[in-house]
Image (spheres, rainbow, N blue to C red):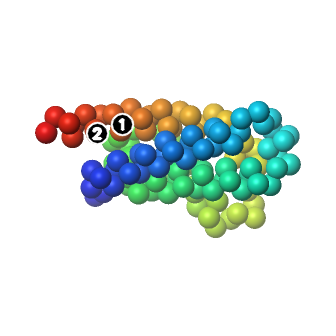
Amino acid sequence: MPSKRDRLTALHHIIENTACVERYLIGMDRKEFEQNDWARDAIERCIEQVCEAVVRLGEQADELMPGQPWGDIRGMGNQLRHAYDRIDVDVVWRTAKARLQELAAEARRALARLEGDTAKR
């Protein structure tokens, strides 16, 4: 079971990497994204780190942020790490533009709860 510190770190990593993705995508449309190797590489790396943070949360991910598609998230991380030559640009784009923000919002709420629990002690 991850320690509270480990959970806090993983949640911070989810939030920080999502913020990076949002910054990298400012002013970029789908076509520009597909044509920009640097942006795609950076965003894929950030998504990979988000997925790894979820892996590090382990079974507590669902407890901290219920209702997320944990299998899909972990699977995407595996895809980015091991099947990098078969990455679907559309999946990365949709993840970057929509899915990450929802996950980061849940991570912020979970982080606030955990930090609130710590402050009460």
Position of residue 95 in the picture relative to residue 86 (left or right): left
Q: Can residue 59 be seen in this snapshot?
A: no
Q: Which residue is mark 2?
A: 114
Inspect the image, locate mark 1, and give the three-letter code of the amino acid beneath it: Ala
Position of residue 87 in the picture relative to residue 63 (left or right): right
Inspect the image, locate mark 2, and give the three-letter code of the amino acid beneath it: Leu
> Splitting the image into 4 quarters, where does residue 1 fall?
bottom left
* Circle number at residue 110: 1
Q: CA distance from mark 2 to mark 1?
A: 6 Å
Q: Give whichever of 7, 22 is nearer the camera.
A: 22
Residue 8: x %, y % from top left: 35, 47
> Splitting the image into 4 quarters, where does residue 81 fall?
bottom right
**Residue drawn at (54%, 55%) of the image:** 49
Residue 95: x %, y % from top left: 64, 41
Q: Are marks 2 and 1 in contact (CB under 8 Å)?
A: yes
Q: Quadrant of the C terminus?
A: top left
Residue 27: x %, y % from top left: 76, 33
Q: Give whichever of 46, 62 is nearer the camera.
A: 46
